[in-house]
Amino acid sequence: MSSHAAVSDTASDPAAVSDTASDRAAPPGTASDRRRWTALAIVMTAAFMDLVDVTIVNIAIPSIERDLGASFGAIQWITAGYALAFAAGLITGGRLGDIYGRKRLFLIGISGFTVASALCGLAAGPEMLVASRLLQGAMAAMMVPQVLAIVHVTFPAHERGKVFGMFGAVVGLGAVSGPLLGALLTQWNILGLEWRPIFLINLPVGVAGLVLGLKYITESRAEKALRLDLVGVALVTTGLLMLVYPLTRGRELGWPLWGHLCMAASPLVFAAFVAYERRKTRKDGSPLVELSLFRVKSFAAGVAVQLAFGVVLGIFFLVWTLYMQIGLGWSPIKAGLTGVPFSIAVSLAAGISVQRLVPRFGRKVLQAGALVMVSGLVLYIWVAGRYGTGVEPWQMAAPLVVMGLGMGLIVAPLTDAVLSDVPREHAGSASGLINTTTQMGNALGLGLVSVVFFSVVDEALPTSQDAVGRVFADAFRSSLWWVVGVLAVILLMMLALPARPGRHIEGAGAADAGALEESGAGADSGTPADRETDGDKGPGSGAEGERQPVLSH
């Protein structure tokens, strides 16, 4: 792949990796110094491309639905399929990088992501688009876990704080620019392609990343990487499909018996997964999921919170898009600009919560965030009912800002709260599991839209555009009440989190290491869902489980 020799992680020094180009005494301005900063720009651009590709899709959904004649079930899978494929492959992608080389997996991931983007942009029908989105999510699972791992082996410990701050800025930019870029590309209808440029724009970026990555990124791999657990991946993916697929397709098929049987049998598949993971642990000590982590009460509760919060995000952002663009008939650019106050509020609250509030008030900040978010949702329900189909973006600003402030108070410190009582040697595995769980929750929430939103639409059977607007507004308010209910459950689960969350970051730059989490809030949006890689010595975890900031999604 490169003329540079592969670098192995060093178990004896968690603050540095021996024999890397960055650890050699290269004076600023030398070729070696410029090379590593070029590598940083490449992986940051790839991370930005992935984040934007998630946030860019929702705003183009009505255009996709009209152009391809896609059913609402297919629309759900265009979004849920990506989240499901990413969640299923995240941990395995990190371990593949450990075993075969982070540079190699990054280049494979960015190549596959670019090809999948081309297939999405050229999709001739909804089925092809759904399949291409699944491939895109799987390739993102190969690419994204390598990003922070490459940073870890390329930069010495004393430079990482500055680098993570730069990542935070990139993630925050992706949170705001994704919906706006999607709105502009869709609104401009470039060459009559309508929504397709939101995917095709990845092609030149991906090709440039591949070519430059071959030249500038240094290869590295873990000295003692864990083995793959493909059976575990297959079991957990099967269980999720048995739960999510009937939810998304059941409405169109009249809720057939097989769908109910699949959903009822999914817990049995998850039970088989747990049994296999226990056997895998005894056999070679490299399970997909470290089950002993669930003996830690705060971690078990925290994973449940992450799963439920993913459901909240999956429901809200899809029904919000359908409400604004189909129900209210707004243009993509009008809908995209409406979400800007929300994204800004999330970013501001995230930074304040980590830097000022959590050190002083601990868990109460997370609980306050849930209450503030519920207040914003209730206010939004009132606004949508008060102004009906004549509502304007400025009237939505207040509830969106309140919701954004609440979400920011939750997403930034949540990962650290969940990890506070986890043994340091398992921090990498725990972080990977947290981020995978959030993506699974997101996919489940997108599937539940059939129940919480379309059940109201189907019951009313609107026949005119005015009736569609009124019915979609009613369905939107109904969905928000479901979100309020899930947040109430989250508030109760937060009682099991530690009162004073601690940080598991070592080495120079630790004070700045939360920057990525802080400004990464709302990237799915803006939807947040923290991303990190897995493995006790996996990407981003350091030689002894040193935890690096997560790449929010």
Image: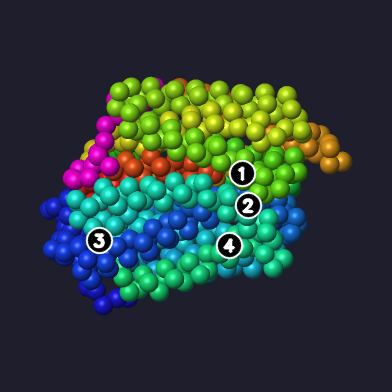
Q: Tell me: 79 left or right of 387.
A: left
> Which residue is pictured at 27% across the width and 67% down the height?
34
* Residue at mark 2: 183
Q: Give the range drawn in magenta.
A: 495-512
* Residue at mark 3: 154
Closer mark to the observer between disc 1 and disc 4: 1
Most foreground residue, 173 or 494: 173
Q: Pick whichever of labels 1 and 4 is earlier in the sequence.
A: 4
Q: Write down the quadrant of residue 124 in the picture.
A: bottom right
Most foreground residue, 389 or 492: 389
Near mark 1 (Cα within 10 A), the count class, few <14, some 14-19 or many ≥20, is: some
Q: Where is residue 522 in the image (x, y as percent from the top left)?
A: 48, 41
Most foreground residue, 149 or 425: 149
CA gap, disc 1 to disc 4? 20 Å
Dot label at residue 199 = 4
> Which residue is pictured at 76% across the width and 33% down the height?
390
Give yes or no for residue 389 being in the magenta stretch: no
Q: Position of residue 321 (x, y in %)?
A: 65, 43
Closer mark to the observer between disc 4 and disc 2: 2
Closer mark to the observer between disc 2 and disc 3: 2
